[in-house]
Image: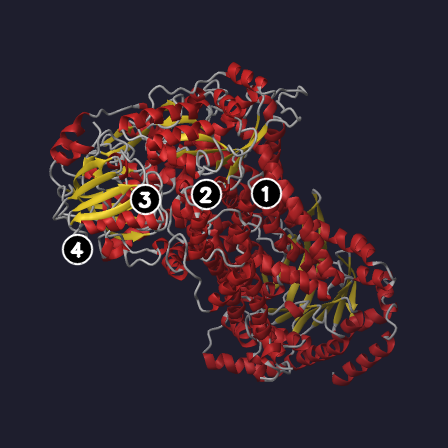
């Protein structure tokens, strides 16, 4: 949907640009008059001879418009090209070299950005004298600094990337690295910058010309407006054919570049594509109808996933991320879900949480939780379950906390979303749950960035526990943490599970960890469950080639398993 | 949600509105002139009773009416009076602050001062003030009036014969002192100006004897005047004048149409005339301003220093075509040359015709021919006749005229390169004379005052007294020695003829000026030559008005 | 308070600003003098100036302080700046500071409401569109806002005048108050509002697109963040998701942008003030450039530069109020 949307925007932009280009290139050959020729009486209204009337000198306005398209486009593109070029070079050199050169360039950029640009334009315009060249120079001067700053920021982020570091360590020359590694990565960012610059320069050109600071002798859309305004076009009906058309031309051109720029920007900037609005209700209904004929959940299962299929559209067809997966989880049980990245295990977690990112959707199957099918519940009903009865410990917990809220606020919100509690009760519960995850209560006042990675993960776990949920979905909870911390966190989870008797789906690509935690384990590959069973049995006796391959690739497997089975036996 | 809705609403609203407005607009213009009939009656009724307030839109700001820093003559004269009125541009100025003037011999005049007149601050006006002012002009810093005392003519002695009589003694014959000098120099209050350290930095509100006191001034925003009820020529018929400064032409006429101002001091351009004539309460009055639009040649530079070449330059200009296009025919082409033909001091037989063939012939004779067949003539040493023509960006009509001149000169083999400069640069250019050709304008003081014509040949405006110009110098010498007004005029006519044969200023056109005003509010505007209709006489009672104003 | 003030982040920022200010001041001093043209012209008008003898010209130049060496003028200017003495305007014959004080309130009167309206609407619609990303209403808003952003400000102004002022006569087309207004109290306020309406709409429309786009993309960014997903997973209500989690974070860059634009808008109002003949700083600048009124130009430049720097400083200083991370960084850097 969004792809189509932004493509539409891109196409619309291209279409408008095509019109403008046509106007500029072909227009002058089609309009029967020369723009600088006095082809009629002054101030003629539109008629057969002159479709848009004539100006104060008897020149054909339509002819002026098409010639103006050339001027405006030329100024816009040349100035944008220069500004982007200078900005890119300065940004690249500054960002790449760092040190004194960087500081020097950036101070210049700072100063340039502090200078009032319009006054600058006026003064420079006056100093050099009016001509198209002046306009180009002035606009370039005003725009390059902003571009330089943006390109520098990008360069900085590429400078420390692997390929660049590798090339450096192999002794590649600076110029070579810039040309071969950094510039190609920067290029996709430079293009939208350029397109936006074209926009700004066309607008600036018209403003300057309108103020009489352009070159009134050259035909541009701005100068047409300058004459229209100074010959009082507004006070007669002449504004309809003398003011509106050039204005519309400017809007159309700028819009064309804006749309294209937006489209390109969205393509190169993944952050703009990360989020997608949930599909409209009726789309969900459609999907739900297919789910109708599924048998009810097994009576003793807390979670019963039946024939779950998750799919999303790709390249005209659909791809199944999860393909007819069924499993069940009893109360107090830990279910391990193992597979390589892309095997669909995290998608199952999202499906259970009802947090699938569109356009992915559950196309078949059912997810029964405590007897009701989650896929059939209203979004409010799902909300009441989430964080309350089903809790989630996400992967990449480093970023799972809101940076502008402190720990207490975030925990309190989880509580308040599901229960009405007094302030004191909330405080008490927060202290309690923090203690459970091994954090002193003073950390409640801290902001996420003040915590280490491990502490953050503890907070996230606390958040999952705070409402005493029936089920916890732990989706690779140790990703991104260093090894020591991983061990600690796993230990913590293990303890919590034991002491609180948690039911948990534990998802990981790290087989040993799963083996040490889970009662039962599912092995997934390419969206399907390829093997499953009691964890110990699975590890020891599975004959499935995929499982075996996974297990055999773990060198420490045997001692770890032994240890665990001993522990397990000792406890039961 | 609501933001989206209201936004959509706003858009559709705008759309509907603009459609509606477009409809209205064309209707308005389709039904021309709902007739002028009813307003005459009302206006007549309004006569002779005072109007509480008039709002006059000004197109530019002139500072706090200090004649040393800015001049808009019609504003200056609301506050200040001269010995004679209304101006040097009429046949016979009337005594004003003076009771009478008498020429005793070729170089001596005595002026009797009116008694009982008071300055705005209540101090009495005396002959001392006149003596002080003339001496201050002669000896002090220069302003636009001072050469009338210090050079052409030169008043060497100013004495008081008695407390109400001033005696002026000139350095050489000064037959036109009464008609020109006395009618041009505003009289300043001695008790204020003798204490002024630096007149150019003086920013207090002016004290004069005139019909209006300036009570408030906000730079670039507005002037507020109050009637001087004790004015010696009769109490003004408008109590208060408010003059907002509205520089943008569209804004000023828009304000006039909307009733925010009652008259615009910016003349109505030809393209708007009809729209104001069609408006029920509006009238448009035509005046013949003593101003002209000129193409100035830099006489210091070759080849403009050749008289015959200047003649060719003049012959090549099709002034009629320019007038038709730029003024939509509403104005007169500059076929009668310089100075302004409507001035009583201008030779009525002047002529500056358009004749391409003759222009070519003159240049051929000067050996300025196209040797390399590129369409542009060259001088004997192979330099192409290519000149730059500079115009200010603030005057779109002049830019258009320049574009036409370029084509016209191309026809006779002269290449013109038009350069549009902002008015700041433009002013410097013409002052440092760093130009080939410029387009400019000059008002009544320059083109209707015979002394100024002579002065302009000395000051560098039309010629520089350091450069010999034997024919003109000879005539100037005769002119200065001449003691009779009429004979002087004859000599001046000869000078003008000579000038237009080899002009350093080619007149493009004499603009007509039309002023649109709200006739329901005030309908007693009269024209004073060179001042338009916004002048102090329009605001004075009927009797006085008739005596000085143009029919 | 470990470490000296100079090594603190705030101290460094201040030094940087002083440096920028010094360079900007120098450029401000130099720029007007590079332009051709001469303030003398505007005293007398062209015809008078030509009648002045060279001696008289020199005398006038001396009176105006234009005959001194550039270095002297520069020294005067720089020392003057710190005494808030910017000299006297040649054109207005008044102290530059006085003229500025006269004009500044008018510009603020236009800019402040426009900024607020444009920020509020831009943010609201931007957040709404982001929340509905990919849906038809998002596309509509997006293209709509891109279109509005493509319209030159002066053209909006001209059309508004043509429609609402010339044709309908609902709003006045120029000035800030009716000329010589005598009514008091409420009437005066009403008149002010009437005069403000069209220019404020113009500036609002000219700036709203930027606010919208920035909010939208910033909001899209935060909506894709893990903490928003986490908040959803913990069962937070939609209102909290949007406001507490997504928007609160998304507004951080928007806040910086808007605060910084405070400074730029002082000069950015030139075109709008010209179209509406509004007596603000922008038009003052335009007029003084045309008149080559050096002291006045410098004054306006100074005000604009100060405005930009002050806005930057304001953004720097107030940002930590909204982002605890910035607070922390400062503390960390302050302690050695």
Task: Say few, some or many: other residues with alpha carbon within 10 Å of mark 1 (under 14 / 14 to 19 / 20 or more).
Answer: many
Task: Give yes or no for contact between labels 1 and 4 (Cβ–Cβ under 8 Å).
Answer: no
Name the subunit of mark 2: C
| Disc 1 target residue | A134
Front of the two marks 1 and 4:
4
Closer to the camera in the image, A349 or A42: A42
Left/right of residue A71 with respect to residue B273 in the rendered view: right
Structural distance between the alpha carbons of marks 2 and 1: 21 Å
Q: Are marks 4 and 3 in contact (CB under 8 Å)?
A: no
Q: Are marks 2 and 3 in contact (CB under 8 Å)?
A: no
Q: Which residue is mark 4?
A: B123
- Of B94 and B326, nearer the camera is B94
Q: Secondary structure at mark 1?
A: helix
Residue depicted at x 63% and y 60%:
A108
Please report, as a chain letter, where disc 4 is located.
B
Which of the labelled discs sits on residue C55, or is there none?
none
Front residue of this view, candidates A382 and A119:
A119
Q: Is residue B526 positioned above or below A362 on the image?
A: above
């Amino acid at each position: 949907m969004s792809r189509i949307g932004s493509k539409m925007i891109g196409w619309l932009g291209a279409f408008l640009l095509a019109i403008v280009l046509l106007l500029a290139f072909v227009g002058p050959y089609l309009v029967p008059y020369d723009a600088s020729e006095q082809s009629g009486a002054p101030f003629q209204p539109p008629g057969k001879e002159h479709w848009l009337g004539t100006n104060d000198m008897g020149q054909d306005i339509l002819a002026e418009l098409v010639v103006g398209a050339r001027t405006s486009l030329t100024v816009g593109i040349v100035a944008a090209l220069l500004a982007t070029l200078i900005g890119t070079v300065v940004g690249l050199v500054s960002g790449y070299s760092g040190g004194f050169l960087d500081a020097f360039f950036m101070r210049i950029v700072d100063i340039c950005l502090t200078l009032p640009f319009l006054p600058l334009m006026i003064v420079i315009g006056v100093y050099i004298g009016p001509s198209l060249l002046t306009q180009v120079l002035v606009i370039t001067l005003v725009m390059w600094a902003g571009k330089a700053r943006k390109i520098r920021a990008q360069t900085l982020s590429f400078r420390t990337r692997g390929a660049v570091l590798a090339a450096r360590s192999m002794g590649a020359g600076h110029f070579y690295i810039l040309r071969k590694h950094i510039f190609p990565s920067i290029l996709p960012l430079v293009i939208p910058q350029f397109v936006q610059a074209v926009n700004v320069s066309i607008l600036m050109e018209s403003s300057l010309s309108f103020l009489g600071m352009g070159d009134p002798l050259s035909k541009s859309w701005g100068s047409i407006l300058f004459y229209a305004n100074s010959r009082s076009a507004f006070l007669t009906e002449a504004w309809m054919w003398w003011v509106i058309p050039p204005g519309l031309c400017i809007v159309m051109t700028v819009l064309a570049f804006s749309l294209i720029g937006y489209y390109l920007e969205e393509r190169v900037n993944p952050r703009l594509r990360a989020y997608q609005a949930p599909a409209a209700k009726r789309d969900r209904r459609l999907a739900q109808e297919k789910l109708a004929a599924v048998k009810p959940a097994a009576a003793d299962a807390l979670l019963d996933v039946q024939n779950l299929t998750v799919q999303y559209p790709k390249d005209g067809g659909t791809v199944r991320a999860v393909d007819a997966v069924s499993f069940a989880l009893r109360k107090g049980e830990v279910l391990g879900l193992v597979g390589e990245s892309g095997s669909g295990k995290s998608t199952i977690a999202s499906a259970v949480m009802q947090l699938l990112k569109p356009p992915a959707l559950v196309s078949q199957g059912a997810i029964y939780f405590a007897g009701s099918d989650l896929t059939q519940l209203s979004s409010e009903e799902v909300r009441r379950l989430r964080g309350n009865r089903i809790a989630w410990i996400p992967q990449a917990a480093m970023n799972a906390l809101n940076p502008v809220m402190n720990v207490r606020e975030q925990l309190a919100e989880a509580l308040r979303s599901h229960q009405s509690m007094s302030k004191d009760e909330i405080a008490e519960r927060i202290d309690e749950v923090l203690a459970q995850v091994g954090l002193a209560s003073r950390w409640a006042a801290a902001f996420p960035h003040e915590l280490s990675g491990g502490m953050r993960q503890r907070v996230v776990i606390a958040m999952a526990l705070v409402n005493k949920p029936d089920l916890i979905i732990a989706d690779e909870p140790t990703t991104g943490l260093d090894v020591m911390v991983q061990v600690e966190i796993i230990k913590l989870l293990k303890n919590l599970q034991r002491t609180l008797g948690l039911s948990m789906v534990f998802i990981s690509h790290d087989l040993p960890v799963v083996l040490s935690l889970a009662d039962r384990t599912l092995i997934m590959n390419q969206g399907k469950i390829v093997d499953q069973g009691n964890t110990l049995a699975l590890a020891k006796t599975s004959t499935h080639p995929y499982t075996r391959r996974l297990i055999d690739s773990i060198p420490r497997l045997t001692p770890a398993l032994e240890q665990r089975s001993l522990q397990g036996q000792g406890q039961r | 949600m609501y933001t989206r809705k209201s936004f959509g609403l706003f858009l559709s609203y705008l759309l509907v509105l603009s459609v509606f407005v477009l409809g209205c607009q064309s209707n308005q213009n389709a039904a021309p002139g709902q007739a002028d009939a009813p307003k005459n009656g009302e206006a007549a009724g309004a006569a002779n009773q005072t109007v509480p307030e008039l709002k006059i839109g000004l197109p530019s700001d002139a500072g706090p009416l200090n004649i040393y820093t800015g001049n808009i003559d019609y504003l200056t004269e609301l506050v200040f009076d001269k010995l004679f009125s209304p101006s040097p541009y009429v046949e016979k100025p009337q005594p004003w602050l003076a009771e009478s003037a008498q020429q005793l011999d070729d170089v001596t005049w005595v002026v009797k001062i009116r008694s009982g007149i008071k300055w705005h601050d209540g101090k009495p006006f005396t002959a001392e003030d006149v003596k002080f002012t003339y001496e201050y002009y002669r000896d002090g810093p220069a302003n636009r009036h001072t050469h009338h005392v210090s050079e052409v003519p030169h008043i060497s002695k100013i004495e008081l014969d008695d407390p109400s009589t001033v005696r002026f003694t000139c350095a050489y014959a000064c037959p036109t002192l009464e008609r020109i000098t006395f009618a041009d120099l505003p009289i300043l209050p001695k008790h204020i100006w003798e204490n002024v350290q630096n007149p150019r930095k003086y920013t207090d509100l002016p004290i004069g004897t005139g019909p209006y006191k300036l009570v408030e001034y906000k730079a670039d925003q507005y002037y507020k005047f109050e009637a001087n009820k004790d004015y010696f020529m009769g109490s003004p018929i408008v109590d208060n004048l408010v003059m907002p400064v509205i520089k943008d032409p569209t804004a000023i006429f828009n304000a006039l149409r909307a009733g925010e101002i009652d008259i615009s001091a910016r003349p109505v351009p030809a393209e708007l005339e009809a729209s104001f004539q069609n408006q029920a309460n509006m009238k448009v009055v035509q005046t013949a301003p003593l101003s002209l639009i000129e193409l100035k040649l830099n006489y210091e530079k070759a080849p403009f220093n050749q008289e015959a070449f200047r003649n060719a330059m003049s012959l090549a200009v099709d002034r009629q075509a320019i007038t038709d296009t730029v003024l939509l025919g509403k104005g007169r082409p500059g076929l009668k040359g310089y100075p302004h033909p409507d001035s009583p001091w201008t030779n009525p037989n002047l002529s500056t015709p358009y004749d391409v063939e003759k222009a070519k012939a003159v240049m051929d004779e000067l050996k300025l021919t196209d040797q390399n067949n590129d369409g542009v003539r060259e001088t004997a040493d192979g330099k192409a006749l290519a000149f730059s023509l500079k115009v200010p960006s603030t005057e779109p009509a002049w830019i258009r005229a320049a574009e036409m001149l370029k084509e016209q000169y191309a026809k006779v083999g002269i290449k013109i390169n038009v350069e549009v400069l902002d008015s700041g640069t433009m002013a410097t250019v013409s002052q440092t004379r760093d130009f080939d050709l410029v387009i400019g304008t000059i008002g009544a003081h320059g083109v209707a005052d015979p002394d100024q014509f002579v002065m302009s040949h000395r000051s560098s405006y039309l010629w520089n007294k350091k450069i010999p110009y034997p024919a003109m110098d000879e005539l100037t010498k005769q002119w200065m020695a001449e003691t009779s007004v009429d004979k002087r005029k004859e000599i001046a006519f000869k000078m003008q003829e000579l000038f237009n044969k080899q002009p350093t200023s080619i007149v493009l056109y004499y603009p007509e000026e039309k002023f649109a005003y709200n006739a329901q509010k005030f309908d007693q505007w009269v024209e004073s030559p060179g001042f338009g209709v916004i002048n102090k006489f329009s605001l004075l009672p009927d009797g006085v008005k008739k005596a000085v104003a143009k029919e | 308070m470990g470490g000296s003030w100079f090594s603190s982040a705030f101290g460094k920022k201040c030094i940087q600003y002083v440096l920028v200010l010094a360079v900007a001041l120098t450029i401000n001093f130099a720029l007007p003098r590079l332009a051709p043209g001469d303030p003398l012209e505007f005293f007398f008008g062209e015809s008078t100036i030509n009648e002045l003898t060279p001696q008289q010209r020199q005398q006038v130049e001396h009176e105006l302080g234009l005959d001194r060496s550039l270095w002297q003028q520069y020294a005067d200017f720089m020392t003057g700046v710190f005494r808030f003495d910017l000299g006297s305007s040649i054109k207005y014959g008044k102290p530059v500071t006085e003229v500025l004080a006269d004009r500044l309130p008018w510009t603020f009167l236009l800019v402040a409401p426009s900024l607020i309206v444009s920020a509020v609407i831009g943010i609201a619609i931007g957040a709404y569109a982001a929340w509905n990303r990919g849906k038809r209403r998002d596309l509509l808003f997006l293209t709509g806002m891109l279109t509005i952003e493509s319209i030159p400000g002066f053209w909006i102004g001209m059309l508004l005048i043509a429609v609402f002022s010339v044709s309908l006569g609902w709003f006045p087309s120029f000035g800030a108050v009716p000329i010589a207004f005598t009514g008091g109290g409420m009437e005066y306020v009403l008149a002010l509002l009437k005069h403000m309406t069209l220019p404020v709409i113009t500036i609002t429309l000219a700036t709203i697109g930027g606010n919208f786009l920035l909010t939208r993309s910033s909001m899209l960014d935060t909506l894709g963040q893990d903490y928003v997903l986490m908040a959803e997973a913990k069962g937070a209500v939609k209102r909290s998701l949007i406001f507490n989690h997504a928007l609160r974070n998304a507004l951080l860059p928007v806040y910086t942008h808007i605060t910084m634009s405070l400074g730029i808008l002082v000069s950015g109002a030139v075109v709008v003030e010209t179209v509406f003949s509004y007596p603000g700083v922008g038009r003052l600048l335009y007029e003084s450039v045309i008149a080559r009124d050096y002291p006045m130009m410098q004054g306006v430049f100074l005000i604009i530069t100060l405005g930009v720097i002050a806005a930057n400083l304001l953004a720097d200083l107030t940002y930590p109020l909204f982002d605890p991370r910035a607070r922390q960084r400062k503390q960390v850097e302050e302690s050695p």
